[in-house]
Image: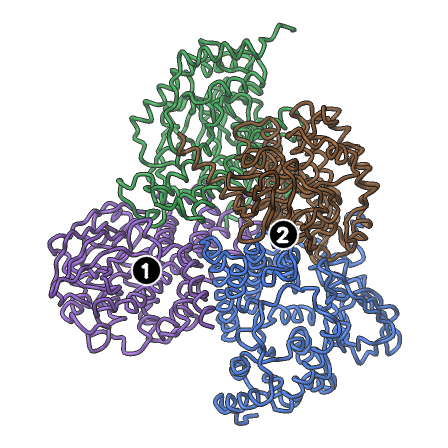
Chain colours: A green, B purple, C brown, D blue
């Protein structure tokens, strides 16, 4: 079909008018620090509620799901329109939690593999902010090797019975639906016995437990599925073809903020304002005249600017097909290392206040906690090691690592020193 | 840690290790997380009976340090502290005990430190921007037979538990030290927050604190050498504690790499990770090497002691913390949970990196020491 | 380099690439190693005919830079210079041509620069400790209708070949610039040694060099903005040249990793090396990204241009040189021989790292720029 | 046999007396820079001659081959005596070039695998400084994989005929004898077809070519063996058992300065005086008051002190068997990285003089050349990558890397993309 696409200009005016009339400007704040504990549950829930509200407002204003086809409640526009929206939203509130993992990978997977009925039911609900999704992907037993999932799904008439445990779901305790990778056949090779399901998180048979991080934060959860019954109509993709879905799922996850499904106001990625933050710490430490401190401030500022430029380049490169889809791993690797470096710089600038502080230290306080959590930036959302594998093997085309589990029936795969198959 | 221990040394290490196995279990450490004191006085008293606080005190004062070997033996205790992330003001109490014994005064207080009924701590560091080494501004004024203290010290270890404070400051003549009861009028504490689960620190304010000349440790304005000596003691013990934590975390992570399988192979079979373990092993051995050489040099008061101990602090502070972070990374998500033990040691390293001079501060001190040598030669 | 080139841009890049394939072959570069000039004037003249020196010069002055795109196109030429480690004062001549054209004077000299018969170079940097950004001490005195230059500039690119020198210095009023014939009385050169095979630099002394006011470029004491603009131009071109060398060395090394077998497997199959290639690929893409953004920002005179161009220089200077060293390491012994081509690009990066401000200097400049913004806001 | 061993004290007096009476104190010089070109051949030859002379003096004084058994002209003393000698020689000239590779690995290999006759002929000659040895080990084709040698030795009656090429021999042009690893059987697996030979370097059939490094230095050589005839009496170890010799050979090479066969005056390892050197550069650059420069000086000093301590610890650990023999790879890895870092620090301190300089810059000059050659410190004498393999696999006991060539007949082993077997 060949309908007239809204011009970028009229779109910009429309978006800009709505935003300025309806959204709240974000108050200048320091770098969003690594999972600090000082965030109370009530605050969290209030923010979630407001974000659902904002998502609904965007939907009603025709600004939700820019690149989602119209039949599913989206706008059927182009990545260029999404970029315009991101530019116009600079400095305004937006539904952070709705973006990842709801819009990508979950919504992306639904669009790609969901049945017409599944799409029509869930996509609009997501665009209206009624459904926040989580990915039930990682398991305690298999870290980066998500295809090694042990969660089992056994068919029972028109239903499936799921048992197992999933972990590292951010905020499953306030989310609605889950996309879940489960094993439906143990006698075939690892990748050939998987199937994908979706179900409401608040179902009998799902127990959600908060995971306490070393800094006291409890934003991650672990879920225990015991005899969870899921109707076959909530299966996504074919039985035992779950890895066809899964590999695209992981691709959409890696795309993260580079996905054209994601709304991401310019200048609001984590690294935002690094230089200014470091400057504030150094000032509080009375070190602005110390060349060593200046060097560190400059390095943080450099990493921020380079990181933003790289993210844009990779996004553009993938969009224009001048770069492989897998190149998003390059941005991920850079960001992980830049963020850990920034946490270290802040810790160093804080001097002796890095390890012990009092609240009245203001800008000097708390950086030791971020330092303790530093590696979270290189672990969460796919480790930097996995990113390095993807870059060397899929971007540079170097030989794949040996995977002895590839062709074994899954039940015979070595799983640990104590269970070497 | 030392490559070869004498049987006495091995006994001391072993006794401490067994005591901490029993009394500093991870469950206990987690429990102490919310305890304002961070350790039980009974725990400390019993530790003191094992000799924890006697190793820098001369025999005349009831200590065991006849020879220069006391400090080296203390590193074995500190090493076990690190391996267990154990609670207790090991550094400060020993520094104070050693300082008093060296000054040959305050014997009754020394006795209390030795049997663990008293705790002494050292008020030396100051807030940024005076947290670099030797930029102390704390004021001590001499009024005929009285000394008047004014200023703020932070962080001060276990100040909330301490019966006495060893305070380092400046008089017109130069560095001066006094030992005073923590309860002295004009002394006030603000408890600090921090990265470690059990180590407690405070900001200690001194507002016109007046004490008799009898509180002096050494002579007015002549404490520079003693302060340097105390700093060296503190650094040696701190480094040994860091080494214990590094070794423990490294061992845990090697085990994990053999146990944990990914894609049907142990993590230990992935060359990219193997090479990172090789680098970690190198940092670890290098830290052991410089830590032990520095300890020996300080114990024997060798001229290169200052150089070596700052090199050790700069290296262990930098690479020790990086080693711990690598251990976290190699553990993946579980490594940043409160449930896993790894962070107990990461916390200890993060603290050790900062106390008594960051790696940066000690690199600069090394440059100063080199410069002095060059000017001299 | 830009992800997508317009057909004109691709033509320019392609023409330069073909010219350099033919006239800057590695054998030729090795031959020039002992040539005091470092390049043949004929080579430069023919390159100029391809437009190498016309991209910062306005159309009125006979250049092609009608729009803001001239600088971006110049980065394509510079990129090819880097990919070939090509000889020739591309940075300095373009900076001078751009500065003169902007000042709207000295048209006949501009014409010479455009057709490659004249070479102009920029005398701006000074010897340590004044080699940081903006700590210039070079003295320019104003005596009624004359200017008197005193001081030393180094390193000055191709000063031995230059017909004219653009000199930046201080008068009482502030930064001031003059363009003078290299042959002016009182100007003397000392050739320098260096890391690059073909780039030549000199120390240029100015002893009571007296020139007429007509030599002024811009107004006395008001050159600060022009100097900043010239610095930004120099940095953009330098970065693009470094990028070309990085890309070439990286491609060579990836090829090597596939070709070279060790223990019966290609190097490219060793995960420890694969991960290092992954990091190199990341440094390379990040360098392309920030280099291009900085070029565009400078070309369009955007307010963040200064920040971006210093971030680019700091990043490319640091990681570009590290990338080249990794390439050497992955080649093994052959990588440090004169016979192998790798060092041609390592030399270019080593030079680019230092010229117009080390990474350190640009990190400090970034901190200053941040500070100014913070004070302003 | 149970003879009375000389006491350390009397040994110390004897050594000290000789040294002070006969050896020249070394004039204080800056860090030995990475293979600088500014060393003329005549100077090199003069130094070699003097070192042979000094070695002879040591021999006559009963101070050569401290740990070499008496029957072969050594002193039959202990590593402790060697350490005493190293201490006493602090600050005095010593035969640098005689140590590595002559004393270790070459002399060590002779003692371990040579026949009685071979030992009696060569060991005394080495101790007298009459024979300087080189190892013909690496080949252009096989980098770190020395067991992949392509140099062939074919039996012809009582002789062997060698053809091939060896490379990375330091100063083969002024050396006397070579230890050479060659392939004597191509139809068995890689490690089963090797044999070790020794022969004079100045033989017909050996052409020695100097290799020019990127900095102009020509201290390395490449040798071309064409129909070189070597009597079977100069074979070391059994035919085709060359890897038994070879693996010990490489171990002795890794021991390097930790070997008790090596005389190494204290304080003269490469890193000697790093802090002072950096201080001098910073002074010449007028940066002594710049905290950033001080930090770099301090870092260099730290790396030197840590490196020396580590070398001693590893040496002691291996000597007392508290550490695995393979632990010398730890010292090697540290040294390589510390040296490259030091070269980088010097380069940074030199500021703009790092890339271009004039001779009158004095302490500021030339550091750019060292920076260009930086990686030589991580390549020469076994790459840091190989050291990391040894540490992870042989010290930590992690699984070995896959070596597809292990069990193939050598002629079928893949050697390059163009010759994949």
Q: Position of residue D169 (x, y in %)?
A: 73, 68
Q: Viewer-proximal residue, B10 or C82?
A: C82
D381 up-or-down from B331: above or below: below
To which quarter of the image does residue D222 belong?
bottom right
In the image, taking residue A270 as reference, residue A311 lies left or right, namely right
- The chain to which mark 1 is attached is B
* Residue at 55 percent of width and 25 percent of height: A259
In the image, taking residue A325 as reference, residue A161 lies left or right, namely left
Q: Viewer-proximal residue, D254 or C301?
A: C301
Marker disc for residue C207: 2
Whether labels 1 and 2 belong to a single chain: the reply is: no
Residue B376 visible in the displayed image: yes
Residue denoted by label 1? B81
Neighbourhood count class around disc 1 (C-alpha, 10 Å): few under 14, some 14–19, many 20 upward: many
Spatial distance from mark 1 to mark 2, Cα to Cα? 68 Å
Q: Secondary structure at mark 2?
A: strand
- The chain to which mark 2 is attached is C
Q: Position of residue A93 (x, y in %)?
A: 41, 21
In the image, taking residue D266 as reference, residue A393 lies left or right, namely right
Q: Viewer-proximal residue, A201 or C348?
A: C348
C110 up-or-down from D197: above or below: above
Quadrant occupied by the N terminus of chain C = top right
């Amino acid at each position: 079909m060949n309908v007239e696409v809204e011009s970028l200009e009229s779109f910009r005016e429309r978006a800009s008018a709505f935003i300025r009339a309806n959204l709240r400007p974000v108050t200048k704040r320091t770098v969003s620090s690594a999972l600090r504990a000082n965030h109370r549950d009530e605050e969290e829930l209030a923010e979630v509620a407001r974000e659902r509200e904002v998502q609904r407002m965007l939907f009603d204003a025709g600004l939700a799901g820019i690149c989602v086809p119209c039949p599913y409640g989206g706008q059927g526009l182009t990545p260029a329109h999404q970029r315009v929206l991101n530019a116009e939203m600079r400095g305004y509130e937006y539904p952070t939690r709705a973006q990842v993992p709801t819009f990508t990978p979950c919504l992306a997977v639904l669009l790609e593999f969901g049945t017409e009925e599944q799409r029509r039911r869930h996509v609009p609900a997501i665009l209206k902010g009624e459904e926040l999704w989580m990915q039930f992907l990682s398991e305690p037993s298999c870290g980066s090797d998500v295809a090694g999932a042990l969660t089992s799904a056994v068919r029972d008439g028109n239903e499936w019975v799921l048992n197992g445990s999933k972990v590292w779901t951010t905020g499953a305790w306030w989310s609605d639906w889950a996309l879940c990778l489960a094993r439906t056949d143990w006698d075939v090779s690892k990748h050939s016995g998987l199937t994908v399901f979706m179900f409401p998180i608040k179902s009998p048979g799902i127990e959600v437990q908060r995971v306490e991080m070393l800094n006291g934060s409890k934003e991650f959860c672990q879920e225990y599925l015991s005899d969870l019954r899921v109707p076959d109509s909530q299966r996504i993709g074919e039985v035992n073809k779950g890895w066809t879905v899964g590999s695209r799922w992981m691709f959409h996850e890696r795309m993260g903020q580079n996905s054209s499904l994601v709304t991401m106001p310019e200048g609001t990625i984590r690294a935002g304002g690094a230089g200014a933050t470091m400057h504030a710490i150094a000032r509080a430490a009375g070190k602005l005249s110390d060349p060593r401190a200046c060097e560190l401030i400059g390095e943080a500022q450099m990493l921020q600017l380079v990181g933003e430029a790289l993210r844009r380049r990779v996004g553009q490169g993938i969009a224009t097909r001048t770069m492989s889809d897998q190149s998003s791993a390059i941005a991920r690797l850079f960001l992980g290392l830049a963020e850990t470096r920034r946490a270290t710089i802040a810790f160093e600038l804080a001097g002796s206040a890095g390890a012990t502080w009092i609240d009245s230290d203001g800008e000097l306080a708390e950086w030791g906690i971020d330092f303790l959590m530093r590696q979270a930036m290189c672990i969460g959302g796919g480790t930097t090691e996995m990113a390095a594998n993807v870059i060397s093997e899929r971007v540079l085309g170097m030989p794949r690592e040996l995977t002895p589990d590839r062709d074994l029936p899954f039940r015979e795969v070595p799983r640990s020193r104590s269970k070497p198959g | 840690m030392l490559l070869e221990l004498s049987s006495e040394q091995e006994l001391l290490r072993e006794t401490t290790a067994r005591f901490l196995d029993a009394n500093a279990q991870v469950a206990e450490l987690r429990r102490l997380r919310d305890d304002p004191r961070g350790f039980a006085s009974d725990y400390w008293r019993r530790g003191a009976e094992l000799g924890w606080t006697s190793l820098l005190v001369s025999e005349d004062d009831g200590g065991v340090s006849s020879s220069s070997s006391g400090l080296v033996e203390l590193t074995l205790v500190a090493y076990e502290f690190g391996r267990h992330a154990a609670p207790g003001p090991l550094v400060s109490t020993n520094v104070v005990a050693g300082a008093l014994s060296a000054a040959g005064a305050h014997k009754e207080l020394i006795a209390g430190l030795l049997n663990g009924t008293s705790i002494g701590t050292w008020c030396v560091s100051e807030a940024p921007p005076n947290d670099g080494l030797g930029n102390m501004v704390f004021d001590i004024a001499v009024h005929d037979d009285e000394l008047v203290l004014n200023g703020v010290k932070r962080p001060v270890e276990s100040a909330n538990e301490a019966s006495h404070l060893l305070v380092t400051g400046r008089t017109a003549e130069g560095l001066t030290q006094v030992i005073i009861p923590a309860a002295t009028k004009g002394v006030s504490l603000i408890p600090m927050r921090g990265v470690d689960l059990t180590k407690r620190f405070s900001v200690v304010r001194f507002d016109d604190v007046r004490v008799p000349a009898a509180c002096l440790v050494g002579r007015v304005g002549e404490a520079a050498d003693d302060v340097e000596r105390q700093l060296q003691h503190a650094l040696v013990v701190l480094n040994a504690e860091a080494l214990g934590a590094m070794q423990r975390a490294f061992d845990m992570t090697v085990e994990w790499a053999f146990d944990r399988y990914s894609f049907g192979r142990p993590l230990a079979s992935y060359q990219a990770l193997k090479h990172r373990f090789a680098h970690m092993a190198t940092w670890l051995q290098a830290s052991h090497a410089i830590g032990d050489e520095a300890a020996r040099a300080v114990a024997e008061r060798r001229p290169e002691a200052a150089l070596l101990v700052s090199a050790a602090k700069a290296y262990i502070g930098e690479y020790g913390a990086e080693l711990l972070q690598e251990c976290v990374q190699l553990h993946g998500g579980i490594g940043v949970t409160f449930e896993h033990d790894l962070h107990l040691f990461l916390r200890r390293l993060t603290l050790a990196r900062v106390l008594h001079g960051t790696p940066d501060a000690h690199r600069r001190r090394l440059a100063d020491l080199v410069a002095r040598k060059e000017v001299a030669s």
